[in-house]
Amino acid sequence: MRILGIESSCDETSASIVEDGVRILSNEIASQIDIHARYGGVVPEVASRQHLLAIIPIVRQAMDKALTGWHDIDAIAVTNGPGLAGSLLVGVSAAKAVALARGIKLIGINHLEAHIYANWLGKTIPEFPLLCLIVSGGHTDLVLMKDHGAYTLLGKTLDDAAGEAFDKAARILGLGYPGGPAIDKAARNGTPCIELPYSWLPGTLDFSFSGIKTALYRLVENNKISNPSDAAASFQKAIVAILVAKTISAAEECGVKQILVSGGVASNSLLREQLVRKSPVPVLIPEPLLCTDNAAMVAACGYFRLITGAQDGLNLDVIPTLKLL
Ligand code: KG4
Ligand code: ZN
């Protein structure tokens, strides 16, 4: 089954062709990072306009790269939430237009579920039961996955998401946007020698990152940071230590066979290294390009939904606050 995936929930317009949910034939991404960088974050109205400009060229590019015509496409999978309403509307409207014009099946996909399915695009096929750590700009969730579509939420952030914390810390340290990659890079030239308050929230699998970020802000405000690279290394160490410890205790509690990591923060080098080294079970992490937003993960997820008989009509709408659970 050949699926066209479309993703436009935030600041990347992406289209991809994936075969049988596991083989990527093309995965084209038009990033708006440079445009939003000057504002220090994503400006929703600017994002929607850029999606409008990019959507048709990116779908064409994905079709051309995969040497695919419309008659070879069995279904279209499109992110319909969560995300920015205007951005989501561009992808969903394009998907509906093609579905109507060409008589192709349509399915709306939850962006968070798509992040999980990025792990089906790697060399190792995941084995249930699994523990998923979803770490993105908007979410930090620990989810038990017993089968396709069978999720139990074990823990979540009570305030900032991990990616949001990285972005805010980078802004505080003047390291630029997007903050996660900037902190990751700066941390390589620093030593984690600055003490920050770790919020462990003992007895729960929930997370809290806003206290660490505020502590960093106070240190900068009081001129206590002389080397931003040391601060980046210390901040990264704190966030990663908490993510790793909670993920491993959840994996042990639930007796899972594997841990899957997904979302933009899954491309963090320290998180990748520490989880793989400390986990008692195998850890699957997509290659960095498949961790951040892309349409291949949407197409992969679409395949596993469609084979259960799921399908949407042309009344498919965007749900900016859509939840996985
Ligand atoms: O999944 P994603 O592309 O978009 C959302 O669905 O939110 O994640 C974006 C987030 C941003 O907060 C970005 O700073 C973070 O992922 N990120 C990283 C790294 N690369 C991206 N955080 C830490 N280290 C990285 N290397
Ligand atoms: Zn995402």
Image (cartoon, grey):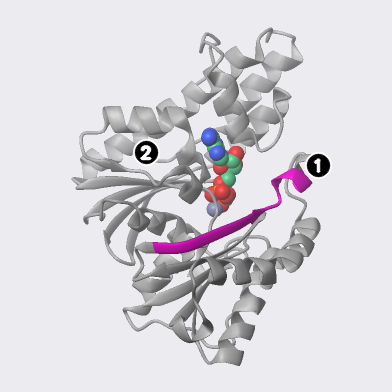
Q: In this view, does 121 lie above or below 246?
A: below
Please report the residue visible at 64 percent of the width from the left and 28 percent of the height from the top. Answer: 169
Q: How far apart are marks 1 and 2 (CA)?
A: 36 Å
Kindly identify the amino acid type of the residue bearing the numbered disc 1. Answer: Tyr
Q: Main secondary structure of the magenta part?
A: strand
Disc 1 is placed on an element classified as loop
**Residue pointed to by mark 1:** 39
Residue 324 occupies quadrant: bottom left
Q: Assess mark 1: CB under 8 A from ligand 1?
A: no
Q: In the image, which is nearer the foreground, mark 1 or mark 2? A: 1
Determine if the magenta segment contains residue 31: yes
**Badge 2: how crowded within 10 Å, few (<14), some, or many (20+)?**
few
The residue carrying mark 2 is 204
- The residues colored magenta run 24-36
Residue 282 drawn at (x, y percent): 23, 40
Is mark 1 in CB contact (under 8 Å) with mark 2? no
Q: Is residue 56 above or below residue 182?
A: below
Instruction: Provide residue 94's location: percent of width, then percent of height.
Output: 65, 77
* Image location of residue 15, percent across then percent down: 56, 65
Drawn side of residue 44 relative to residue 316, left or right: right
x 35%, y 35%: residue: 246
Point out the tag, 1 or 2, that comes first from the N-terminus.
1
Residue 82 visible, this orientation: yes
Q: What residue type is labelled 2?
A: Thr
Q: In which quarter of the image is residue 223?
A: top right
- Judged from the image, the secondary structure of the residue bearing numbered disc 2 is loop
Name the residue located 36 percent from the left edge and 27 percent from the top edge: 274
Ligand 1 position by quadrant: top right
Q: Residue 237, percent across and down?
A: 47, 22
Q: Quadrant of the N terminus?
A: bottom left
Asked if 90 appears above or below 229 in the picture, the reply is below
- Which quadrant holds the C terminus? bottom left
